[in-house]
Each structure stands twice: as C-alpha cells, then as structure tokens.
Image (cartoon, rainbow, N blue to C red):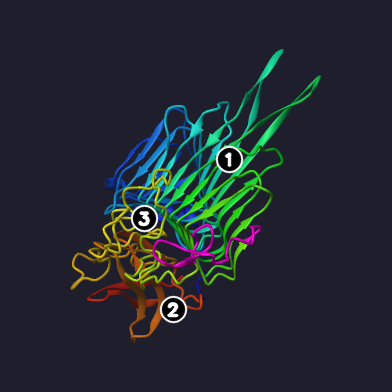
Amino acid sequence: MKPKCKIITSFQLLLIWSAVSAQTPVSGDLSGTWNVEGSPYLITSNSTVPEKKSLIINPGVSVIIGENIKLTVSGIINAVGTYDKPITIAAPNENVSWDQIQIGYSATGESKFHYCHISGAVYALHLINSTFSSDTMENEVFNCRITRCSSAGILAQAKGIWKSNGMSAPSAYKPYINVKIHNCDFTSVSNGIVINVDGSRWQHSFGYWYTYGNASPVITGNTFKDIPGVAFKMTAGTLWEEKSFPAFINNSITSCDTAILAITPYDVIIKNNIFSDNNTGIVRTGTKSTNAYFNCFYRNTTNFVGFPSSYGSLALVNRNNTPCDVGFNIYSDPLFTDSYPDLSQKSPCVDAGTADTTINFLQLKDIMNNDRITDGDNDGIPFVDIGAFEYSKSVSIIEYEEDKGICLNRNFPNPFIKSTLISYELPRQTFLKLQIISLHGVLVKNIVNEVQPQGKYSVVWNGNDENGRSVVSGIYFCILSCANHTECIKVIKLPQ
C-alpha cells in the first residue's frame, strides 16, 4: 500500500527546525536582546514588542517569521547589523509570506533597521503614526535589502486624530512621520515605498473641526529595480492638507512600471536620480509644484506626466556640456557597468548632480560604501554624481584577482522533505551563481544569478526545478560559483 504524503505547515516546519538545531522559537511579548548564539529566532505566532519595552537584534542574527504572522512594535525595535554582519528577516520558505513588522510612535525613542536583508512579507515595514501626539516619527532604515513583498517594501502612514476630553473641547493631534530611508535596495517588490496621509474630523454644535497627518520622508541613495508597481508612491485619504514635503534624492530606478507617483497633498523634491528603462518616470497630479532637477532619464516609455512642456525639452547644457532641459535634467545613457548601479568612467552622470549639497540630505557613504562626493572626472572640483552610486576612479567594486573568503555553508535541514535553507558568505561584492545540479550534471534550479554586495545570505530551495515542478527524491549538488571561485555541497531530498 502506497504511504500517504504528509503535509507539513510552515508552523510545523518552524517547530521541526527548532527541535533539531540550536534555534530559538519565540512568540507573545518580545523584548531583550537577540544574539547570534540563539539564531535563527523563529516567530511562531502574532507577537508584540510592548510599549516602553525594547527589542535589540544584534549583527549576524537571522529571524524567521511564520506564515501570515505580524509583529507589532509599540515600544522600540533596533535591528542594527553591520556591513559584514547583516541581519536576515525572512519567511520559512519562498512559497509562504509573513504579514508585516508594524511600528507605531513611541515616546521613548525611534526604531532602527540598519544592514538588514528583509524578504517574503506583505509589507516588510509598516511605519504608522496615529497616536495621541503631535510628535514626529523619525525611524531609520539604512543599508537594507528588501525583496519579495506582495504589497510594498515600506509603508509609512500619518493620520491626524482627535481625543475626547469629556465635557471639554477635544484635543487635536497632528502626527508626523519623517522616516529616513538611505542606501537601501528594493528589488522584486510590488511597490517600493508607499507613504500615506489622512485626517479626521470632530463634529460639534458649530460645525466640524479637522486635523491632519504629515508625511515628509527623506529617501536618498536607494536602488529600485524590477518593480511591477510604483517605486515611490504617494497616497492620501479623504482628509489632508498640503504640508507634506518628501525628499527623493540620488536614487537609481530601473525596470519599474512607474518610478514616482506624486499627488496633490505632496510637494516632493526630486533631485539627482537616474530613471532608466521604466514605463513611466514621474507622474504628477494636481497643481503642486513638484521639483525635478538634475536627474537623468533614459529609455523610459514616458518621462513626465502632468509637467510643463519645458521638462524634457533640451534647451541648455550642464557643467559637463551634456544637453539638458531647464531643470538640468539630462536624457543620456547613464552607462551602468554590469554591476548595477555602478557607473562607468564615461557616464554622463559623473559629477553632474546639484552643486548645492547642503539640502540634499546625503549620507557620507553611497550604497556601495564609497565616499559620497568625489571628483569623479578629475577636474579638481568634486560634485555629487547622479544616482545611487558615486564614481571614483580609485574604486574597484568587483575586479579582484581571486575571491578568498567566500564560504558556502551546509544546508539545513539535510536531508529535507519540503525545503532546505542554504547560507553563504561573501567577503566582497561579486557576481554570483548558486545552482542546484543533479547527479548526472543537469541543471535543476538557478537560485541566485546576480551581483550581490558583501554580507551573509540565506536562501531557501523548496525542492522545485526551473519550471516549478517538485523534483524526485535523491542526491543533488548545490554549487556556488563566481569568477575565480567554486564551492559545492551535497543536498539530499527525501520522499514526501
């Protein structure tokens, strides 16, 4: 009699992993410090960081969040990794997704995410200020990689509210959310960053009182790639006022449906960005005077919607003698290298950004950890480059004689039934292939085939081939290869 296949839920998978390895299942009220000794931490049910409590996640820690699970942060969460020891936050496998990390306003401090790799969520981060306060949320999201999010990578919301004071006049609160998002990578998410403002009204004997939210994030030095929706999307509820001033500066946006959607309540500053191979560059609705200066547009189906005709009409030349419009926007090939978003030496974006850097909110380092303002064309005068990458002739990102220090770790669990976790470490940025090969040398699955920055990575193979079909049980090889380095481990799939 043929045995029946046993179906293992993501929750059961978490318990199996915790039972056979030094892993830590957690749930309920969470606080304290998570260290690599207990990693990965497995969040097995909807959980909360309570008000006035803090959860600290140290560098190198992995966090696995179960299917449809939400982490609500009423206190503070600081997930601060480092360049060489990032924090990983992921789903149990690529076939399921967790809900979100929702962070509210806290009077005791701001939450931070630095050097985190976040994947497999509905919203990776949902930042919301709708509390009884007129204070500002200024959370930090720095140097993070966000991918595989079904709704958006980051959702930031601010909503004005009222609080009843009994028989006295109610108190009105105008919350602000001015999150700082710097040097992050958004890839293969439905939308990159979405911000939202809304208000509320209080009825009294003489009519209505109104209050509103304000969203003015600072978004600099990020990359957005392969997004079917909008890279940076501004939305509003039914009640709003025109006092939100986002800044979108020195980002690189490519292969997205729409790069920026700016609507009436927002007056957004758009400077020093590269818009390449998108369906639409910038959409502006309403009468707000969205500023778009010193950007590079290349091979977009449409560059501007809702802008004056002077945008896109070549009338001047910039300091590099490149034809530009009245906003010093250029329309030339940015000349990326094979390692996006790196610029080649001859890129028209080198030293082509704004001269005034005092209002550009720039970090000291770019997304590749290069000094942000350098003299890329060696003319003795340093200017900021257009885009997320700062070119320097002395910088070589992926050209090395050998790739020492690359490490492919043993997968876990091994043998496996439904899925297995494969981890590896890169001492520097490089072009990497991670493949599953059969005993007969036939390619089964391309898991990774891209340039990746320095750091620690974890990916899941669910036992499927390139066509999504489950492979037969047996022995397979996982091969990691780059220009001058190859490693291999044996992976065993058991019958279900």
Work out which residue is located at the far front of the displayed protein and give it: 316
Q: Give the label, 2 or 1, closer to the camera.
A: 1
Judged from the image, the secondary structure of the residue bearing numbered disc 1 is loop
Look at the picture and state if 96 lies above or below 269.
below
**For the magenta stretch, what is the residue range?**
305-330
The secondary structure making up most of the magenta span is loop
Distance Cα–Cα, label 3 vs label 2: 54 Å
Inspect the image, locate mark 3, and give the three-letter code of the amino acid beneath it. Answer: Val
Left or right of 191? Residue 58 is left
> Which residue is tagged 2?
472
Residue at the (34%, 71%) spot, across then down:
346
Question: Where residue 32 sits in the image (x, y, percent)?
Answer: 35, 35
Distance Cα–Cα, label 2 vs label 1: 55 Å
> Which residue is tagged 1?
244
Judged from the image, the secondary structure of the residue bearing numbered disc 2 is loop
> Which residue is tagged 3?
384
If you read the primary sequence from the N terminus, does the residue marked by circle 2 or circle 1 appear first? 1
Inspect the image, locate mark 1, and give the three-letter code of the amino acid beneath it. Answer: Ser
Q: Is residue 369 magenta?
A: no
What label sits on residue 378 in the rendered view? none
Question: Where residue 143 sits in the image (x, y, percent)?
Answer: 37, 51
Q: Are marks 2 and 1 in contact (CB under 8 Å)?
A: no
